[in-house]
Each structure stands twice: as C-alpha cells, then as structure tokens.
Amino acid sequence: MKKKSLGESISIPDEFTEQEKRSGDWWRHLVAAGIAGAVARTCTAPFDRLKVMMQVHSLKSRRLRLIGGFEQMVKEGGIHSLWRGNGVNVFKIAPETTLKIGAYEQVKCYFLFVSGSLAGATAQTCIYPMEVLKTRMILGETGQYSGIIDCGKKLLKQEGVRTFFKGYIPNFLGILPYAGIDLAVYELLKNYWLEHYATNSVDPGIIILLGCSALSHTCGQIASFPLNLVRTRMQVQGEFFFFNGVIKIHNNEGKKGFFRGLTPNIIKVLPAVIISCAAYEKVTQHMGLI
C-alpha cells in the first residue's frame, strides 16, 4: 500500500494492494483517515474560525489581531464559540476524503500537479455547499443558527439555492494550485529524501513525513490564500462579484489585504498534521491494520 499527503491529513493511502481490496481493509483505512481528520480539525478549529473572521472583518475599525480575535470570540459567545462551524467542517470530511482519493486514483497516471489539482477540484465541487454553511455558521452570532440543518433552511429561504454556490469560482481557481502544490511538493520532498539520505529503507520515517506534509501544506496554503480570501468574502456578501471584489480589496486594503488571516492559518498547519498523523496511527492500530 502506498500513502500520500492530503493536506492536513498524513499517511492516507492512495493505492491499495489486491489483498487489501479483497479483505476489505481499504475502507477501514478510509474510516481511519476520516476519524483522524475530524480529530485534527476539531483541535485546530479555533484558528480556522479566527482566520475566517479576520478575512471578513477588513475595516480598520473592526480589524482583528491574533490574541484580540480570540478574546472577542470568547466575549461574544463563550469558550465553546471557538468551535462554531466545526460541525460542518467535520461532517464534510467523509465525502471530501473519499472523493479526493477516488479522483486521485483515476488521474494519477498524469504528473503529480495535474492529478492533485483535479482530485482537489473534484472533491471541492461536490462538497462546496458545505463550505458555504461552514463560513456562515462561523460568522453567525450566538443563537443565530441552532445547527447545520437550521442554517441551511434559513439560507435557502432567505437567499435561494444560488447562495450555496457563492464564491465557487475563486474556490475552484484556488484549489487547483493548492491541491496541486500540496501533493507535488510532498512527493518531491519525500522522494528527494529517499534518493539522497535513505540507506536501506524505503520508509522515510514519521518525522520526515511530518516535515514534508507540513511544508507542502504551507506552500499550498500561501499560493492559494488570496483566492481563499476572495471566496470567503463572496460567501458572506451576495453582491460581491469576483473581479470587482479583487479590485475592491486591492484599492481599499492593498496587497496585504489578500493575506489577511494567513497567520492563524499557518499556525495551525503543524499541529493539525501531527494530530492527524497520531490519530490515524492509533485508529489503524485499534482496527488491526498495522
């Protein structure tokens, strides 16, 4: 069985042996990957919510900083508000991971950047309405939405079906460099280590894999972050058209405006990767896969 990086998840299988397919172990690995991703996202959810709030609250009078942002969230809704919107983020892991791995399997005969980009784009297209729900719940006030279903019903009633696809264009354009760079850099770094530093083992070891995954994920995040920010603004502001929005951000906030919220996003990368890896290993051990 071969493994690859999937963003904040590490050591997720992308190719199964015939024995694993016959025994049914392949779906156990997918379940383990989903559980690991849920644990990692839950542990780093406060940073994810802060990132979204920093992206949206761009005016100088409302601009958030790292510590002040956490203080504001706790003051508004208590400690538990730091995890607002995490339910949607966890709920979409199963279809997102399955679609990404399935799409990667179909296009892996092409070079890494293309296969990674197509896999990511396919997964994001299918689960995009959940991204909109996550953003709205993250930015919602305490008591505004009772849950995922309530949020979806209110958006559908007040704004119509189209609201679930606001920001899709920058999201699609952003996932191409993100997924492509993430997978390509991970494989390049891992293969470079194997070629130059490995002795008799074909397994780089957990420390090397953690470093490769964290660095590749960071590169992908930085490359796609401006489009991620535009997407978030469009999800919140209905009149926010793509090209007009890009010009508006540049004129009002300058080039730095496109990277607002990047700091908490980068901070969460390493702990997310470590937690995901540890959880995946524990779950696979419990399921008798290793």
Image (cartoon, rainbow, N blue to C red):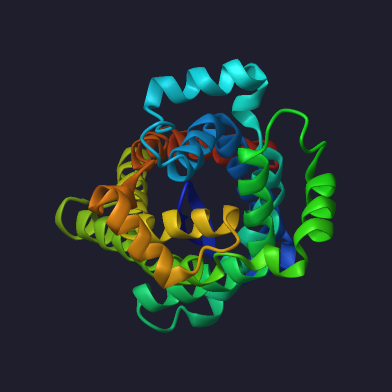
Q: Residue 174: x and y, percent?
A: 42, 66
Q: Quadrant of the C terminus?
A: top right
Q: Please name whichever residue, 210 or 28, is drawn nearer the observer in this view of the structure.
A: 210
Q: Residue visible at 78% across and 38% down?
A: 145
Residue 48 appears left or right of 19: left
Residue 229 appears left or right of 158: left
Q: Residue 244: x and y, percent?
A: 41, 68
Residue 61 appears left or right of 159: left
Q: Vertical placement of 22 versus 32: above or below?
A: below
Q: Please name whichever residue, 107 or 233, is drawn nearer the observer in this view of the structure.
A: 233
Residue 49 appears left or right of 81: left
Q: Residue visible at 72% across and 68% down?
A: 22
Q: Residue visible at 57% across and 73% down?
A: 122
Q: Quadrant of residue 78?
A: top right
Q: Please name whichever residue, 286 or 200, is drawn nearer the observer in this view of the structure.
A: 286
Q: Residue visible at 63% across and 63% down?
A: 128
Q: Residue 230: x and y, percent?
A: 44, 59
Q: Residue 162: x and y, percent?
A: 70, 70
Q: Vertical placement of 49 versus 6: above or below?
A: above
Q: Please name whichever residue, 188 or 135, is drawn nearer the observer in this view of the structure.
A: 135
Q: Vertical placement of 135 versus 267: above or below?
A: below
The mark tally for this picture is 0
Q: Look at the image and tell me whether residue 183 can be seen.
A: no
Q: Look at the image and tell me whether residue 156 can be seen.
A: yes
